[in-house]
Amino acid sequence: MVQIEPLEVSLEAGNQADSALLDDDGRPRRTGTVCTASAHIITAVIGSGVLSLPWATAQLGWIAGPAVMVVFGGVTYYTATLQAECYRTGDEETGGRNYTYIGAVRSILGGANVKLCGIIQYANLVGTAIGYTIAASISMQAIKRAGCFHANGHNVPCHSSSTPYMLIFGAFEIVFSQIPDFHEIWWLSIVAAVMSFTYSGVGLGLGIAQTVADGGFRGTIAGVTNVTTMQKVWQSLQALGNIAFAFSFSNVFTEIQDTIKAPPPSEAKVMKKASAMSILATSVFYALCGWMGYAAFGNAAPDNLLTGFGFFEPFWLVDAANVAIAVHLIGAYQVFCQPVFALVERKASLRWPDSGFINSELRVGPFAISTFRLLWRSAFVCLTTVVAMALPFFGVIVGLLGAISFWPLTVYLPTEMYIAQRGVQRGSARWIGLRALAVAGFVVSAAATTGAVANFVSEFNKFRPFSG
């Protein structure tokens, strides 16, 4: 076991060789590049939410659906460029680093904004972990059901419980959660990114094949209409939340940027390039998957393209896509949980700096095992797994998470930090534009949250906890 000591850099003490291994803040030298940052972003962005996009498009129709998707993609990229400017306070190459999103808010804005960021960001991260546990279990469950449908026919119920698969997913996460930080999970993010393109590509291919077989596009201008007016309103608002969730990654943006190697070029320039590449790639995939899925199934599009059994055959290809989803979500879970892990462990280490229980660790490959980390992270995974078992309705959880977090994390805080960081003059055209964007984001987020809460209550009233 190795006792971790505070890092010290002293050229006078003859530590020139050691200092070459450290960055300007005394931390181990960062090695992240455009490639690794893009992999982290793609892993965070292309989640299982892509599979709910045909359903979201169906609620909005052929005009509003694509338009909303384009707008959310554009807003996400623009605010990402603003957030990239806030990694360092002051000069973008020599200013003090902000290691976390909440750290940037504290350094640049302070006050009530810090509490707002902390509550929304970490609630969203925990909620995402729960949502990904549900999604992974549904994909694993779908593999068993696909085999059943193939063997017994498509009209056989083939019911099965998702609970065992949640336990399996949780077991994997307990193991991978012993990877200590973002810097060590780059390889897992690359694997997850490849898997995300794999299942998105399968969904796209099957959608195109179904559309060709049908001889044309399905769907309507207005989307789903065989529901009551109130149901149409609630489902349309939930669709906004689903699309917002599909593009969301601001809650881990700063933590990803903190993996990028020191200037030149500045971390802001590298992160902007990585964001542009990643959001462009994911937007194209989102558009193709969402729109082709809607074209294939029209207003009957399921809330999950691959696990809702819009496609039954070829069953082996659907199975392969669902395996890719599960593997991707194993990596995505870690990307979203690392800030939560880091927050608790940093506070514990500062509170008890001499505790071997907290600070002594054993390195085994990419894993760094300490008694505290093993117990705390395992307990966290168990908690998210239990909550997922109690609330296994994926589509509604996705919409609720996206709706609640979109305005504060993706729009409001990045614009406020940019205004303060760059000294944007009050009343200028840019100031007015940023304020207008924040107001518009709030209206959309409030509306989507209302719809998501209404759907959550409806689903919860029909469901018996732990009966999934």
Image: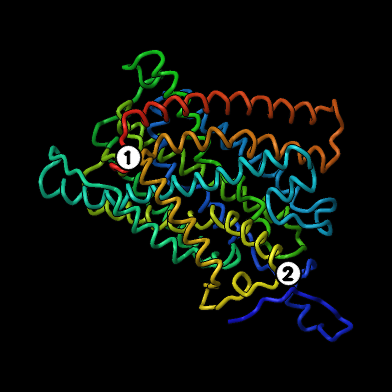
Which quadrant is home to the C terminus? top left
Q: Nearer the viewer, residue 108 or 360?
A: 360
Identify the disc placed on residue 27.
Answer: 2
The label nearer to you, 2 versus 1, is 2
Q: Nearer the viewer, residue 108 or 213?
A: 108
Coordinates of residue 313 in the picture (x, y in percent): 21, 46
Q: Which residue is at 60% across, 55% downward?
A: 339
56 sits to left or right of 277: left
Identify the disc placed on residue 390.
Answer: none
Q: How is the image coloured?
A: rainbow
Which quadrant is home to the N terminus? bottom right
Q: Which residue is at 79% across, 41% downward?
A: 109
Coordinates of residue 463 in the picture (x, y in percent): 32, 33
Coordinates of residue 420 in the picture (x, y in percent): 82, 39
Quick one: SS at disc 2? loop
302 sits to left or right of 195: left
Q: Tags 2 and 1 in contact by the CB under 8 Å rule? A: no
Q: Quadrant of residue 394?
A: top left
Q: Could you classify mark 2 by the number of other residues whose Cα lies within 10 Å: few (under 14), some (14-19), or many (20 or more)?
A: some
Q: Which residue is at 64% across, 25% downward?
A: 440
Q: Which comes before the other along the chain, label 2 or label 1?
A: 2
Q: Amino acid at mark 1?
A: Gly
Coordinates of residue 335 in the picture (x, y in percent): 54, 56
Q: Residue reaching furthest bottom?
A: 14
Q: Amino acid at mark 2?
A: Arg
**Which residue is disc 1 drawn over?**
207
